[in-house]
Structures are given as C-alpha cells and as structure tokens.
Image (spheres, grey):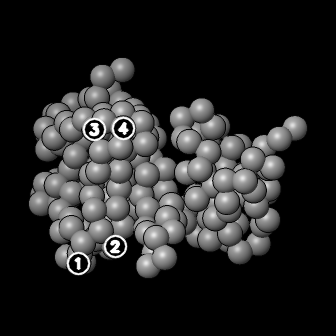
Amino acid sequence: MNAKEILRTHMSKVVDLTDEQFDYFFSLFKPKSFKKGETLITEGDEVDHEYFVLDGCLKTFYTNDSLKMHILQFATSMWWASDYNALYNNEKATFSIDCVADAHTLCLYSEDREKACREIHEVEHFLRWRSNRGYVGLQKRILSLLNNNARSRYEELMMQHPELYNLVPKQLIAAYLGVSRETLSRLYQP
C-alpha cells in the first residue's frame, strides 16, 4: 500500500470521509523518511508536529540524570509519535524520538491539524478517538508496570506486538520493560 492508502485504511476504522475530505486532509501531511539511528525530536526541542508511521519503527524515550534510558513507546506501522506535552502545551520536549529501523512517516504540523479539525468534523472526531485510545493504552501500561512482574510484562508485550521481537534490539525491549538486558535474556529462554 502507498502512504495515502495506509492513512485512509487507518482512519476508515473510525470515520468515513468523502474522497474530497480525505484528499484535503492527506494534502496537509509532509512525507519524511528517516534512517536507523536518526533523531526526529531531541529533549529540549520545540515541537510543532507529530508523525504517523507508515513503516519502520520509532522509539520515544527519556534519559534520566544517571543516563538511564526509559522507553515510553515503540511506534510501528499505523502508530503516531510525538512529545505530546510539548506539542499541545508549547513547552520544550521532555522526550526524544529516534529511529530504531529505517522509517517512512507522514508529518502533520500542529497548525495544519488544527485547521483540519476546524474544517472537517470527522477529522476532529478521528483525532480525539486516537488520543483517547493512546490515553487508555498508557493507563494499561502503567497498571501493568505496577502489578506485573517482568516475565508477565514481556509476554504481554510480545502478545500485543509480536513484530517487535525481530524488529527491535533486545536491549531496547529491556529498557521498555524496565529490566536489564541480562534479565530479559532469562525471560525469553525456553
């Protein structure tokens, strides 16, 4: 599928747009490609955009004062990524986003998103639905971190996103789960 078809498929799960509405919304996106290791957003940046991932993999992460990386999200095909606090509150980025595997994305700038929301009710509905789903996913992840041991969190991640097993280096999966690489090695041994 091409970029337009991927976005249309993603949106059609929630809203029905006319061809004219969708063409207009799609025209607001800017295609951007990134190579493995390339940085999209760095902590401290001003953020006025978000990314819709067509293929590849991005990671959103925070590095603390002890230089320990905490991964908040892996974004693969049909996922969105940004530092949303920075995006919506005009604050400096707290998180960084980089490319785990070569990625093709569609970049949507805040000004264009708001314009589309004002002009097309269905787009506003879709974006609200997407934000709500992200919020629910975050709540589930927090509960899992609070209540489950490392093995359960690993099994849950692999069941929900099996594509990550071969796409993401194991040390990054360990950072996402909040365990060491050695602990992760013990978790996925038969």
In this orientation, which residue lies closer to the viewer: 23 or 176? 176
Of tags 3 and 4, which is closer to the observer?
A: 4
Q: Considering only order in the chain, which callout, 3 or 1, is on the residue closer to the N terminus?
A: 3
**Quarter containing the C terminus:** top right
- Cα separation, mark 1 vs mark 2, equals 9 Å
**Quarter containing the N terminus:** top left
Helix, strand or loop under label 2: loop
Disc 1 + disc 4, Cβ < 8 Å: no
Residue 91 image label: 1
Question: Which quadrant of the figure has residue 97?
Answer: bottom left
In this orientation, which residue lies closer to the viewer: 8 or 102? 102
Give percent across and percent down for residue 180.
Answer: 67, 60
Residue 36 image label: 4
The answer to whether residue 131 of the structure is visible from this angle is yes
- Cα separation, mark 3 vs mark 4, equals 7 Å
Give percent across and percent down for residue 108.
Answer: 20, 50
Q: Considering only order in the chain, which callout, 4 or 2, is on the residue closer to the N terminus?
A: 4
Question: Which quadrant of the figure has residue 55?
Answer: top left
Disc 1 + disc 2, Cβ < 8 Å: yes
Of tags 1 and 2, which is closer to the observer?
A: 2
Helix, strand or loop under label 4: loop
Residue at numbered disc 2: 94
Residue 34 image label: 3
Give percent across and percent down for residue 156.
Answer: 72, 51
Q: Residues within 10 Å of mark 2 (few under 14, many from 20)?
A: some
